[in-house]
Amino acid sequence: MSVVKELIRTDQDGTISFGNYELTKKTKLTDYEFKGDLYKIKTYNEITRLEKNDNLLYESVPGTAVTELDVNDTKVSYKISGNGNVSVTMGMQDDTEYRVVIDGVVAGHIKTSMGGKLSFSVELTEGKEAAVEIDVVG
């Protein structure tokens, strides 16, 4: 899977894609409008961070590329690519339990704190992507 050269884009299927882990210099794009919301992307080989209306939506260390990001009230899904073990933090609802599924395998149930942050790791192989699904439990 390739990186998103334009940093962030709207896909034909109504999802968004973002991130370029091949960059060696931090690159930013602000005020990207998608479905009435404003997005800000910061990406390079060390980190990829996406904010929606100034709130954290996605962050990975090291940097990654994400395609087909689809977010609704009960579920988040996307495909992720990068190099090696990646730590992902998602901005979700406060004090809520989520089920994280990576490539069809349940990675666990994780409850967010009052800050709403959900963290997990994904082992990535260069040139391959992993499918991630996060949904509300109960």
Image (spheres, helix red, strand yellow):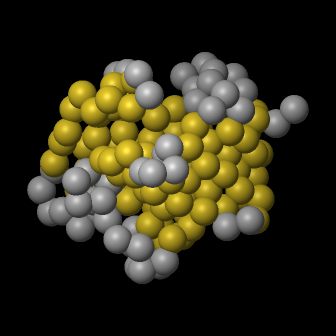
Name the image quarter holding residue 34. Answer: top left
Question: As displayed, is residue 15 above or below residue 102?
Answer: above
Task: Kindly identify the residue that appears in the image at 72 percent across and 27 percent down.
Answer: 96
Q: Quadrant of the C terminus?
A: top right
In the rendered image, residue 83, in percent from the top left (x then y), is placed at 39, 72
| Left-right relation of 79 to 107 | left
Q: Which residue is situated farthest in the left direction here?
A: 25
Task: Kindly identify the residue that appears in the image at 66 percent across and 51 percent down.
Answer: 133
Question: As displayed, is residue 76 above or below residue 102?
Answer: above
| Left-right relation of 41 to 65 | left
Task: Kindly identify the residue that appears in the image at 21 percent across and 32 percent down.
Answer: 30
Q: Nearer the viewer, residue 3 or 116?
A: 3
| Left-right relation of 74 to 16 | right
In the rendered image, residue 98, in percent from the top left (x then y), is placed at 73, 39
Asked whether residue 62 appears in the rendered view, the answer is no
Q: Which residue is situated farthest in the front direction here?
A: 12
In the rendered image, residue 1, in percent from the top left (x then y), is placed at 41, 73
Q: Total label count?
A: 0
Asked whether residue 91 appears in the rendered view, the answer is yes
Q: Nearer the viewer, residue 15 or 102?
A: 15
Q: Nearer the viewer, residue 3 or 24?
A: 3
In the rendered image, residue 5, in percent from the top left (x then y), is placed at 23, 60
| Left-right relation of 102 to 97 | left
Task: Kindly identify the residue that appears in the image at 75 percent across and 45 percent down.
Answer: 99
